[in-house]
Amino acid sequence: MNLHALRLFHHVAELGSVTKAAERLNLSQPAVTGQIKKLERELGLQLLSPQGRGILLTEVGLKLSRDAGRLFSLEARIEQTIDDYRQGGLGSLRIAATYLPANFLLPSLIADYKKQNAGIDLRFTATSSANAIELLLRFEADIAFIGGSQHTHPLLDRTLWHEDELWFVARKDHPFAGRRTTLAEIVEEPFVFREQGSYAREQLQALCAVKRVPMPNGGLQMNGFGELLRVVSEGYGIAFLSASEARDGLERGALKRIYVEDVKLMNPIFTYSRKEPLSAQAVRFMDLLADRRSG
């Protein structure tokens, strides 16, 4: 079936006039009439009957016009869906992130993204840095946000997104709370550490080695960030952690920062993606990150 001729017939049936259909389509009236007659010959059926200055649909013409209306309405919906996917308004986005960005930096961005892109199915996974890389390589994530040490892979691109300063914090009534001190003094105090391999712990170990001071007493190790902060808030030890992790406790007044002379260490957060063009959905998310940073 000639779909072009069917489309012209649909417009004629909808408007009830060959003249009006020709004007809408910016075609000559004879061209429209010729296409419809060609369609009638192809089908072996009469679709239109003259009626004064207008037209009258035959029984089969009326049924065909209704079916054509549904067909072209479906075509329009399909084209809109394709355009939405191309523009990033529909589809899916899969994000993987390590603890710090997952819990402190990304939630508000994800909420804003979903408000602006309700048609996108967003799946967010908080995981380890190694697993985040694996998710990218297995095409199970589109973007990864990884804090701490840099990862290099020939199939991945890496971009610095955010830097979070590492702070020493203690309970508000700790002798060092809110005051300035030296690294040599603070390492004499008890510390509460995260598990071996955590970025902040590794940075403190490297700092102590460079400054030639002993590593603080690590007699208490916590695998969970929440548990670590609760222990420090209860009055035991000093924690060395990212500013974003400590900020809530400081704002509530439960914790205070300790300022250590000549120490400024950063916890970098990188975005990772495969070395290929990002999907439209991922581009929208990265644009939101850029807007938030510039704002």
Image (cartoon, rainbow, N blue to C red):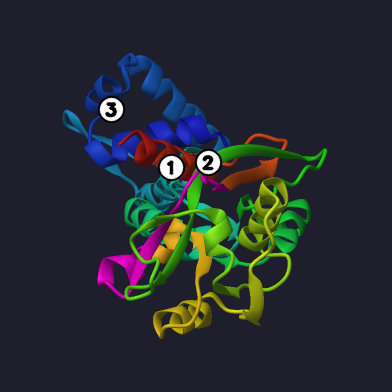
Q: Amino acid at mark 1?
A: Leu
**Which quadrant of the figure has residue 9?**
top left
Residue 150 in the image: x percent, y percent? 70, 46
Instruction: State the CA–CA distance, disc 2 to disc 1.
Output: 9 Å
Q: Is residue 199 left or right of residue 164?
A: right
Q: Which residues are magenta?
A: 247-267
**Is label 3 or label 2 in front?**
2
Q: Nearer the viewer, residue 250 or 38?
A: 250
Residue 219 in the image: x percent, y percent? 66, 81
Identify the residue shown where x is 67% and y is 56%. Answer: 213
Mark 3 Cα-neighbour bin, 10 Å: few <14, some 14–19, many ≥20:
many
Instruction: State the CA–CA distance, disc 3 to disc 2.
Output: 55 Å
Q: Is residue 199 left or right of residue 257?
A: right
Quadrant containing the C terminus is top left
Disc on the earlier residue, 2 or 1: 2
Q: State yes or no: discs 2 and 1 in contact (Cβ < 8 Å).
A: yes
Q: Which mark is residue 21?
A: 3
Vertical placement of residue 220 versus 87, above or below: below
Q: Is residue 168 visible?
A: yes
Q: State yes or no: discs 3 and 2 in contact (Cβ < 8 Å).
A: no
**Circle 1 residue:** 289
Q: Which mark is residue 161?
A: 2
Membership of 33 in magenta stretch:
no
- Please, what secondary structure does the residue beneath circle 2 have? strand
Q: Is residue 106 visible?
A: no
Q: Nearer the viewer, residue 59 or 273?
A: 273
Residue 210 in the image: x percent, y percent? 70, 46
Q: Is residue 65 left or right of residue 137?
A: left
Q: Which mark is residue 67?
A: none
Vertical placement of residue 167 versus 8, above or below: below
Q: Nearer the viewer, residue 251 or 138?
A: 251
